Amino acid sequence: SKVLTSTWAMKKKANGTYRARMNARGYEQVDGVHYDENTKAAPVANEIVIRMIMVLIVMASWWAELLDVRGAFLTSEMDPENRCYLKVPEGFEKFYPDNVALKLLKTLYGLKQSAYEFWKMLVMAFKHMTYERSKVDPCLFFKWTTYGLVLWITWVDDCLVCGNKKGVLEAKKLLMERFDCDEIGELTEYIGCKIDRGDGFMKLTQPVLLQSFEDEFDLPEIPTPTTPATPGDVLRAGTESSMLNDEMQSKYRSGTGKLLHLMKWSRPDVLNSVRELSRYMVGATAAHLKAMYRVMIYCIGTNERGLTLKPNCKWDGDPNFPFKISGKSDSDFAKDESGRSVSGWSTFLCGAPISMKSKMQTTTTLSVTEAELVAAVTCAQDMLFEKRVLESIGLRVELPMILEVDNKGVFDLANNWSVGGRTRHITVRTNFLRELKEEGLLKVAWILTERNSSDLFTKNLQGPSFEK
């Protein structure tokens, strides 16, 4: 047998204490012997689902708490079909003879299957607690109790529970009977975000991440720009001679990676500019590095901004309450030398943003209308997903859902059934929207470009338009 080795990881925690963890070297594992390739998963809740639950917390004035399972990956059993032997860890040699290897009966941090095996245990625990699992997001668990709806969201070993306070405390007690948990307390931090709750709103910011920009990057001393990128500018590929050296390219990748996390969770205003930066993880130039620094300086200078979830109504916990899902989509045609367009879209639950995207389209479109249609369809797909999430936990969505576009061509295509010569090649997308309309699920409406907030996700806007 191949005997695996281990290493020690040392870390200073946020509260000042130190943690030592013995990790197996998972990269030494052999597929089919030590693990099954199909168990290399670390299940986490979908980002849209997390924001949807946050909106529900605000609407119902729910209590929300976080639990962290201690030594989560040390609790699950090893699959008997995958035999793993471990060399005696450093520091424990004196307790064993020289010719001894340890057979693992439980998973360890570092093994490829540890996260999946722990998640299976967690699913079993919720089943014993008589919670149902959402058929849309397998990391969302729910139960209708005498106190109303109680929800759990799992992010590996972080468990968020929300609902009526009495229901939450009862649910928390049940989980703590099955696992040794750290009670993090009321929801003030989650997924790397600081969470501020007020009357009717929840605001997500990432001050620690913003501070790392100043600590880790040699930012130029310039005034805070009014926009994250130069208005009207588009980043383009450079020549081989203009590319950054390996050290600076690594710094560029690190910075862009941090910005990707920032835009995803708390700063949708930098979506388009960071999307452009992420296209040059290989082959970045000084111009790209300068653009990255500009985004960082803008974010630091506007650190009071964050993603604010402020629904336009309250919810009393009634399962028959009609939740409203809406969306706005836009595109920028033939963005750069690739000839492909950019889609931008956002969806809302009772007026609060729950998904925001800026994405280069995967195919080349032949007209502005076709590019806008691609964006509209992807927005509609998000809206359908959100509808299914709510219905999977026993809630009701008001139909039809409203999708707003600022392109008259898309509006006309979605609201009639004729087939024109120049649109025959896009009948699948067109009929997708038409069928949703026929089934009463979706209504496509036209709005002025000035009222379409998704314009922000397709191009680098001028200052006044960006601020609006």
Image (cartoon, grey):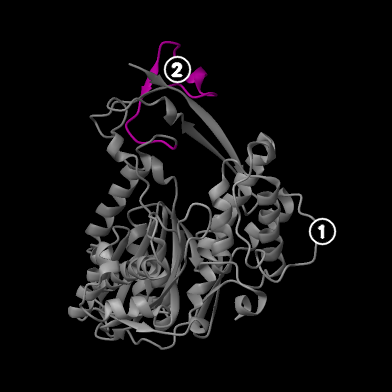
Q: CA distance from mark 2 to mark 1?
A: 59 Å
Q: Nearer the viewer, residue 433 or 420?
A: 420
Task: Report the amino acid beneath label 1.
Answer: Glu
Q: Quadrant of the C terminus?
A: bottom right
Q: Quadrant of the N terminus?
A: top left
Task: Report the amino acid beneath label 2.
Answer: Tyr
Q: Nearer the viewer, residue 336 or 227?
A: 336
Please tell me whether residue 106 belongs to the stretch shown in magenta: yes
Report which residue position mark 1 lands on.
221
Disc number lying in front (2 or 1): 1
The residue sitting at the right extreme is 221
Rendering coords of residue 100 (x, y %): 40, 15
> Which residue is at a point 23% across and 81% down the rendered structure image?
416
> Which residue is at a point 38% across and 71% down the rendered structure image?
369
Q: Main secondary structure of the magenta part?
A: loop
Residue 7 to residue 451: above or below: above
Residue extent of the magenta highlight: 87-109
Rendering coords of residue 69 (x, y %): 42, 52
Marking on residue 96: 2
Any part of residue 133 in sight: no
